[in-house]
């Protein structure tokens, strides 16, 4: 009876996963609709998985009891093959191989049993937790399949010229270069006891996974903003054009942002985002009109100001104090060699019954098409 219950739950779970794949492949739905429907199905998949595991565990306990009774000469029915019966579930239980394939999708590692959307959700979560990635267009987060990513770059194409009637039209030359990004691995391991996973009131597997994603995004953000020649990832601060405000201008203002916007527009760029240090974002929110005492960003009873001259302000604790960046984000690119993947090992600390959660991802740094597309503003010290 328990075996049938477990099989039924796993069959229902398989149908839901197939439905999730169909939704993911449905081009008539937008990304938000897909995410909402898949998230609802995912919660039902988790419930069915728990139901199947619970039935399997109860069945195992009954097998153990019958086996013990048989060995002790009890009145229970003989179960000569009982010790091996516990292994009959190994092909049915969604276990380590499936978790290892959460975002890899390799058939040999259980990839066929895992909906593709899971991998997408992890990179979405990384983007949601990374201030730098949130400011970039989705198409500028570029996946690639080799050790390095080379992005062709048109450096110069010359100027057009006038030609009189009957005269030869001047020829132009295109000068090409490339921006090369090298894949760098970011990783972290978290060990959790089996007792914690079993007894916790919250879903610890999900909690551990989200914390690992958060740690990875913070590490990437740190270097993506401030990384220099000694860091694996070269940061945006070291590649843009930096302007330090004059004496007495000790905080970033809306006027400072407007000046940077004009500098980008002067090269036919389209300013689209402001990244700001925590204190710079706060000073913009608290800036007041001269002589009136009225806040530039709106009344304190309104929602906190989140834009400057129509550009979203994304605060980051990794930017140095008194610093803001105005950028044309379409000219900023990030390479993703491998999406964040979480793999689970039940063997490495077998003797202490600890479960290892390992997150790794391979990013390829930040590349800027031209330095003038990223304007770094630094307030004066005094």
Image (cartoon, rainbow, N blue to C red):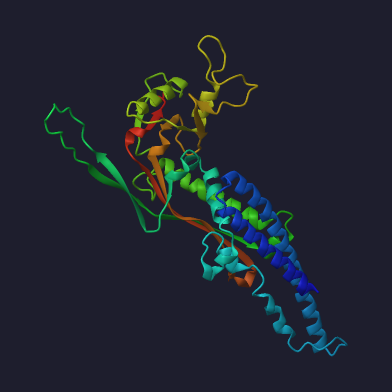
- In the rendering, at what x and y percent does residue 34 appear? 60, 48
Q: Which residue is most to the left? A: 167
- In the rendering, at what x and y percent does residue 165 appear? 13, 27
Q: Is residue 2 above or below residue 160?
A: below
Q: Which residue is most to the right? A: 75
Closer to the camera, 57 or 271? 271
Q: How many marks?
A: 0
- In the rendering, at what x and y percent does residue 257 appear? 43, 24
- In the rendering, at what x and y percent does residue 265 appear? 36, 27
Closer to the camera, 74 or 379? 74
Residue drawn at x 72%, y 62% is: 48
Q: Is residue 350 above or below residue 242?
A: below
Q: Is residue 143 above or below residue 241?
A: below
Q: Is residue 236 visible?
A: no
Q: Which residue is most to the front? A: 166
Residue drawn at x 86%, y 88% is: 74
Residue drawn at x 50%, y 11% is: 290
Closer to the camera, 20 or 248? 20
Closer to the camera, 16 or 266? 16
Q: Is residue 158 left or right of residue 337?
A: left
* Quadrant in the picture for residue 9: bottom right
Give the quarter of the figure containing the C terminus.
top left
Give the quarter of the figure containing the N terminus.
bottom right
Q: Is residue 321 visible?
A: yes
Residue drawn at x 19%, y 40% is: 173
């Amino acid at each position: 009876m328990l075996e049938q219950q477990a099989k039924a739950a796993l069959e229902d779970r398989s149908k839901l996963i197939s439905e999730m794949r169909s939704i993911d492949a449905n081009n008539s739905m937008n990304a938000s609709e897909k995410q909402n429907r898949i998230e609802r199905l995912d919660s039902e998949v988790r419930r069915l998985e728990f139901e199947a595991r619970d039935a399997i565990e109860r069945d195992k306990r009954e097998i153990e009891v019958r086996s013990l009774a048989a060995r002790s000469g009890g009145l229970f029915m003989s179960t000569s093959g009982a010790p091996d019966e516990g292994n009959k579930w190994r092909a049915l239980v969604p276990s380590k191989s499936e978790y290892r394939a959460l975002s890899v999708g390799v058939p040999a590692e259980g990839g066929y049993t895992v909906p593709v959307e899971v991998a997408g959700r992890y990179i979405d979560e990384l983007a949601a937790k990374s201030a730098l990635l949130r400011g970039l267009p989705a198409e500028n987060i570029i996946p690639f399949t080799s050790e390095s990513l080379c992005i062709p770059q048109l450096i110069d194409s010359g100027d057009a010229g006038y030609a009189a009637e009957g005269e030869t039209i001047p020829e132009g030359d295109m000068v090409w270069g490339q921006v090369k990004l090298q894949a760098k691995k970011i990783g972290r391991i978290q060990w959790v006891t089996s007792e914690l996973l079993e007894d916790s009131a919250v879903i610890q597997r999900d909690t551990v996974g989200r914390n690992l994603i958060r740690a990875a995004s913070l590490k990437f953000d740190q270097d993506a903003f401030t990384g220099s020649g000694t860091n694996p990832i070269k940061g945006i601060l070291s590649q843009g054009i930096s302007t330090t405000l004059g004496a007495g201008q000790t905080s970033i203002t809306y006027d400072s942002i407007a000046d940077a916007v004009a500098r980008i527009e002067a090269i036919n760029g389209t300013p689209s985002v402001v990244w700001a240090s925590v204190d710079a974002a706060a000073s913009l929110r608290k800036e007041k009109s001269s002589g009136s005492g009225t806040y530039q960003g709106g009344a304190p009873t309104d929602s906190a100001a989140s834009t400057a001259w129509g550009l979203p302000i994304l605060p980051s604790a990794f930017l140095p104090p008194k610093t803001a960046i105005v950028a044309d984000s379409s000219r900023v690119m990030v390479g993703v060699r491998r999406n964040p993947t979480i793999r689970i090992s039940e063997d490495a600390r077998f003797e202490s019954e600890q479960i290892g959660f390992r997150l790794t991802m391979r990013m390829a740094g930040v590349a800027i098409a031209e330095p003038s597309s990223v304007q770094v503003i630094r307030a004066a010290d005094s």
